[in-house]
């Protein structure tokens, strides 16, 4: 492993430890009806609340998965389940938006659904994704991208998605995540009802 990669890993690990240590209120669980916007915990900053609002306003039409598909989103990766508990759900990806390599809070590259026992798909959030090499080339020396102060997570390659290394930010706008609105895994999302692609 190269020294630069090791330094970057240590930097991300330290950042994660700092965030986890300074945000204890984000771990409080609250229930929210899946059709309604997730309740906003008191611990959210003004910019975090604003980002959730923008994502909700710009994804509400995707509560009907047919609308998302008509706008170029399609299911990739099956239903992504967690390493221990929870899941990420079904990722409907707009490859055209991924290919642009741009970050715009009003145009997420991915909308996320949870498969429900009755067969319908419930919109639970959005995901912003950019290929790391393209982002780094276009933004030399800037490090991981951010939206409204939210730092993206880095996924190395090889990875379970078969993608080159990428930066990603999940926004759980439609189903409150007791671990935080911008973490990767959601402990209350299940892939159990997923029947396959």
Image (cartoon, rainbow, N blue to C red):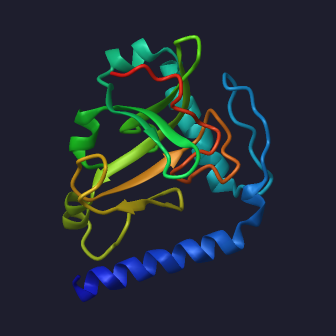
Q: Position of residue 126 (x, y in %)?
A: 48, 38
Q: Position of residue 149 (x, y in %)?
A: 54, 62
Q: Is residue 188 above or below residue 153?
A: above
Q: Position of residue 170 (x, y in %)?
A: 49, 47
x 65%, y 53%: residue: 180
Q: Report the side of 195 relative to 93 (left or right).
A: right
Outermost bottom residue: 3
**Closer to the camera in the image, 27 or 145:** 27
Q: Position of residue 102 (x, y in %)?
A: 30, 49
x 71%, y 66%: residue: 23
x 59%, y 16%: residue: 117
**Closer to the camera in the image, 3 or 65:** 3
**Closer to the camera in the image, 83 or 172:** 83
Q: Is residue 134 above or below residue 118?
A: below
Count of marks overlaid on the render: 0
Quadrant including the C terminus: top left
Q: For residue 136, what is the image quadrant?
A: bottom left
Viewer can see residue 104: no
Q: Is residue 135 above or below residue 125?
A: below
Q: Report the side of 68 relative to 15 (left or right).
A: left
**Closer to the camera in the image, 116 or 46:** 116
Viewer can see residue 47: yes
Q: Is residue 122 above or below residue 144?
A: above
């Amino acid at each position: 492993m190269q020294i630069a990669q090791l330094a970057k890993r240590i930097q991300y690990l330290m950042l994660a430890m700092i965030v986890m240590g300074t945000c204890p209120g984000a771990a409080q669980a609250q229930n929210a009806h899946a059709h309604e916007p997730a309740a906003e915990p008191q611990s959210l900053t003004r910019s975090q609340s604003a980002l959730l609002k923008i994502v909700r306003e710009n994804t509400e039409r995707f509560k009907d998965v047919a609308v998302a598909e008509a706008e170029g989103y399609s299911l990739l990766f099956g239903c992504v389940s967690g390493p221990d508990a929870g899941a990420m759900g079904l990722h409907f990806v707009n490859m055209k938006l991924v290919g642009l390599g741009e970050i715009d809070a009003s145009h997420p590259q991915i909308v996320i659904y949870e498969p429900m026992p009755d067969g319908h798909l419930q919109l639970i959030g959005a995901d912003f994704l950019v290929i790391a090499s393209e982002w780094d080339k276009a933004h030399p020396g800037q490090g991981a991208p951010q939206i409204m102060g939210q730092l993206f997570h880095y996924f190395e390659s090889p990875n379970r998605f078969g993608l080159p290394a990428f930066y990603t930010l999940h926004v759980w706008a439609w189903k409150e995540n007791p671990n935080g609105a911008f973490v990767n895994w959601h402990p209350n999302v299940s892939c159990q009802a997923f029947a396959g692609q």
